[in-house]
Image: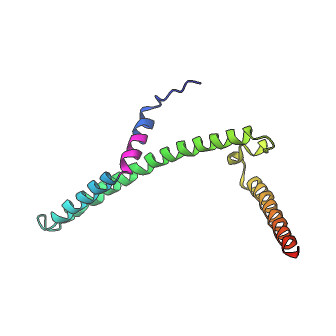
Amino acid sequence: MERDHRGSVFTHFARLTAAISGRPLTFIVAVLIIVVWATTGPLFGFSDTWQLVINTGTTIVTFLMVFLIQNTQNRDTEAIQIKLDEIIRALKGARNEIIDLEEMDEKELDGIRQQYLDLAEHARRHMEERGRARKAK
């Protein structure tokens, strides 16, 4: 199957921004901006405008980054979900009805979760019984 990696302009921008924003150099640049801003405080008399510059800048960057990061996380989560669904589908004996768990409501999820908790408890008891049987020998 041939892949189309073009995607939307926003997707490319979000990926690029996420990649760049997570690098050490980006952090260093952000720290340098804060240092430059702080050292200019005496020059501007620590005025309200001087404070407003950093407050406005950081608010705008934070606001925009929330959307870009959420977009990237949504795509990553969807890709992981598809890969997990493929693994479930491909495994012989797997319960294919759990492929779309993310689409179920909370009550259905709680019921399935309880089934797995019960299975885990049963497995633990079985292991303990086997351990006691070995010690008894």
The answer to whether residue 131 is seen in the rendering is yes
Q: Quadrant of the C terminus?
A: bottom right
Check if residue 26 falls in the magenta segment.
Answer: no
Does residue 131 appear left or right of residue 45 in this picture?
A: right
Closer-to-camera residue (45/104): 104
Does residue 71 appear left or right of residue 13 in this picture?
A: right
User: Image quadrant of residue 116?
Assistant: bottom right
Check if residue 16 falls in the magenta segment.
Answer: yes
- Which residue: 30% across, 52% down? 25
Question: Chief secondary structure of the magenta span?
Answer: helix
Q: Which residue is outermost to the front?
A: 137
User: Image quadrant of residue 129?
Assistant: bottom right
Residue 26 drawn above or below residue 85:
below
Q: Position of residue 10 (x, y in %)?
A: 43, 36
Q: Which residue is outermost to the top?
A: 2
Closer-to-camera residue (37/35): 35
Q: Position of residue 15 (x, y in %)?
A: 43, 41
Q: Position of residue 68 (x, y in %)?
A: 43, 46
Instruction: Specify start and end residues of the magenta stretch as a single range.
Output: 15-23
The answer to whether residue 49 is seen in the rendering is no
Does residue 34 appear left or right of residue 82 in this picture?
A: left
Q: Position of residue 92 (x, y in %)?
A: 79, 40
- Which residue: 75% across, 41% down? 91
Residue 6 drawn above or below residue 81:
above
Q: Which residue is outermost to the bottom?
A: 136
Closer-to-camera residue (104/53): 104
